[in-house]
Image (cartoon, rainbow, N blue to C red):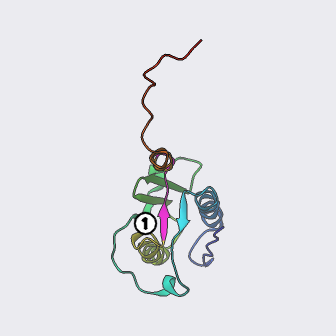
Amino acid sequence: MADIFLHPLHVRERLAWDFNWLTRHQVGDGLWQQNWTHEGRMQEPAEGLNVAVSRWEIVPAIAMPSDRVVVAIEEEGSCIWLIREGYCTHALRDAMNVMLERIAGDGLWLQYWYECRWRRSAQALGPALPSPSLALPA
């Protein structure tokens, strides 16, 4: 489980609630998984490994669904968070992007897609067995 605490002077409560709800889904359902090996690694500066891309983008309200303040656009290798204009400060967006560059870009959190999980599971089974050359009795 992961909770992200956002300063109330930089974010409206609705965004904090919705963002934490979405990240709990991503982490709780295993779509993103922790991948660091020692304490303190999270506090080190970004290494620029470009493992994945994740960032916040502030967008005009007209570009958002009417009932949403945050939408995650996710595809293999990236998760872009569209934030409705007026729900967070530019300073918070910038700070989040620094953190996301570190955790996603350097592979501290890895993205696991259902299709990738299935492919890995199928590969672990090995090649498909050939059909038997003798007919089986009915």
Q: Which residue is mark 1?
A: 55
Q: Nearer the viewer, residue 54 or 67?
A: 54
CA neighbours of label 1 inside 10 A, class few (<14), some (14 to 19), many (20+)? many
Hey, what amino acid is under mark 1?
A: Arg
| Residue at horizontal 45 percent and vertical 45 percent from the top | 126
Q: Is residue 18 visible?
A: yes
| In the image, residue 96 above or below residue 60 | below
Residue at image position (46%, 78%) is 95
Position of residue 123 relative to residue 86, above or below, is above
Q: Which of the pair 73/39 is nearer the observer?
A: 39
**Is residue 47 shown left or right of residue 29?**
left
User: Does residue 113 show up magenta in the picture?
Assistant: yes
Residue 30 at what x, y percent from top left? 59, 58
Query: In the rendered image, which quarter contains the C terminus?
Result: top right
Element class at badge 1: strand
Q: Which corner quadrant holds the N terminus?
A: bottom right
User: Is residue 26 shown above or below 44?
Assistant: above
Observer-nearest of 42 and 72 = 42
- Quadrant in the picture for residue 78: bottom left
Q: Residue 26 placed where, x, y %?
A: 58, 58
Q: Whole-percent x and y of residue 71?
A: 52, 54
The magenta-colored residue range is: 109-115
Is 67 part of what is drawn in magenta? no
Q: Position of residue 51 (x, y in %)?
A: 37, 67
